[in-house]
Amino acid sequence: ASVLMMIIPALSVFFGWLILKEKIFVINIVGITLGLLGAVVIIGVPLVLLGISDNQTVFGNLLIIISACCWVAGMILSKELLTKYSSLIITTVSFFVGMVTFLIPAANEYIQNTAWPTQVSTTGILGLLFITVMSSVSAYFLLEWGISKMPISRASMFQYTEPLIATTLGVLV
């Protein structure tokens, strides 16, 4: 999935140029081309040469591409909003919208099993707090702050570090 998300920098450069009128440099195009070629090789080799392809894999890949498009749309919208609001406000509103969105499924889950809060250990609660505060809130705040300081096309280039970080953490954890 993290390899397939390498489409984000290409989409960011294209839509940053198209919508935000950001400049495109040759180095951006070279970097994106190399990144996309790498992703195509990693994804394409199993699909084409080894014949590893089923409906679930194709559907999953399609969902990841849609997710990447939504991510880029969110970054462009954030870039526009950052001209009026601080990155802290945008992050707060984003998390509030996410909380409201998941309120109905969470309430449904609670109705089905009202005893679940008593079944969560202290370690589970601390893990949830860490994931929420340290990982999610800080990461999204830093993303908003970062795209307020640089063009989306440059900020999205950091996406190329994701497979390395994901693979490293996957091996270590």
Image: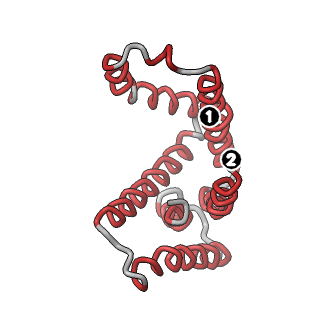
Residue 80 versus residue 169 in the image, above or below:
above
Q: Is residue 39 above or below residue 169?
A: below
Front-most of residues 23 and 13: 13
Q: Which residue is depicted at the point 35% across and 23% down?
A: 109
Circle 2: element type: helix
Is 160 rendered above or below residue 149?
A: below
Q: Position of residue 116 (x, y in %)?
A: 44, 18
Q: Give the mark toward the camera: 2 or 1.
A: 1
Q: Which residue is mark 2?
A: 146
Rendering coords of residue 168 (x, y %):
69, 58
Task: Check the image and report above or below for 122 versus 13.
Answer: above
Q: Mark yes or no: residue 16 visible.
A: no
Instruction: Check disc 2 and give the amino acid type.
Output: Gly
- Expressed as whole percent of the image width and height from the top left, the position of residue 76 reads 51, 50
Residue in the picture at 64% in, 60% down: 167
Residue at the image point whose x is 54% and y is 65% from the top:
3
User: Label 1, on which residue?
Assistant: 131
- Residue 36 is left or right of residue 150, and the answer is left
Left or right? Give the position of 141 relative to 116: right
x and y percentages locating residue 172 in the rendered image = 71, 53
- The three-letter amino acid code for the residue at tag 1 is Ile
Q: Which of disc 1 and disc 2 is earlier in sequence?
A: 1
Residue at the limit of the structure toward the bottom, as seen here: 49
Classify mark 1: helix, strand or loop. Answer: helix
Q: Residue at x 38, y 75 (%)?
A: 52
State whether residue 46 appears in this view: yes
Q: Mark 1 packing: few (<14 Cα in 10 Å), some, or many (20+)? A: few
CA gap, disc 2 and disc 1: 21 Å
